Image: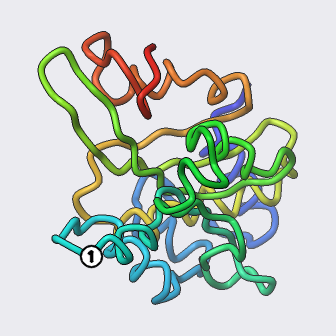
Amino acid sequence: MYNLYYVIEFLLRNYYGKIYNLQSSEVAQNASGVTVNDEVIKVFNDMKVRKSSTQEEIKKRKKAVLFCLSDDKKQIIVEEAKQILVGDIGDTVEDPYTSFVKLLPLNDCRYALYDATYETKESKKEDLVFIFWAPECAPLKSKMIYASSKDAIKKKFTGIKHEWQVNGLDDIKDRSTLGEKLGGNVVVSLEGRPL
């Protein structure tokens, strides 16, 4: 399979008549022209900061959220009704990880933030994971614009320790794969379920 950067470079050469150095994140951001909506940054900051809150505020905090391109393909926005709230867990959501995987569209790309709760042999932890969902069956144009816009959103998500590019359901449906991304073989459970 061709490296996605080379595919994008080929398409940019043919459609725009210019050669871009796609290894540079600044050029990749400018090549797509996509910006990040302020609401995306607000959601990220709300998920990142775990200040002491009331029970009601904790229930409204997002456990997982998807981001997509706006209809005009010029902005990365929060996708409507594609989120899991902490308050939903145990009520309408039995397993947050499985529910998150079900939110992902089977034939298009997305960006996502997932607030993973996991245990290592030593302690219990919570970390945000930035996920770039690019399934094999997604249209090439969608893969191209999402790949070339990824650095724009990553620059806004300062302090993210874990990044994961996923190319299909087989890569994400088994929670142990995320466990490996979070800490290798020291992770013993994810979302309260043993690995």
Judge by depth and name the residue closer to the eye, 94 or 47.
Answer: 94
Left or right relative to 103: residue 152: left
Residue found at x 38% / y 76%? 56
Residue found at x 34% / y 42%? 162
Q: Which quadrant is home to the N terminus?
A: top right
Look at label 1 and name its amino acid: Thr
Where, by quadrant of the figure, is residue 126 drawn? Answer: top left
Instruction: Report x, y in % for residue 139.
Output: 87, 52
Where, by quadrant of the figure, is residue 77 drawn? Answer: bottom right
Instruction: Report x, y in % for residue 180.
Output: 39, 20
Instruction: Report x, y in % for residue 111.
Output: 58, 58
Instruction: Report x, y in % for residue 18.
Output: 65, 69
Residue found at x 23% / y 74%? 53
Left or right relative to 177: residue 19: right
Where, by quadrant of the figure, is residue 12 drawn? Answer: bottom right
Query: Can residue 156 be seen by looking at this rendering?
Result: no
Query: Can residue 85 be seen by looking at this rendering?
Result: yes
Is 34 above or below relative to 184?
below
Query: What residue is disc 1 on?
Result: 54
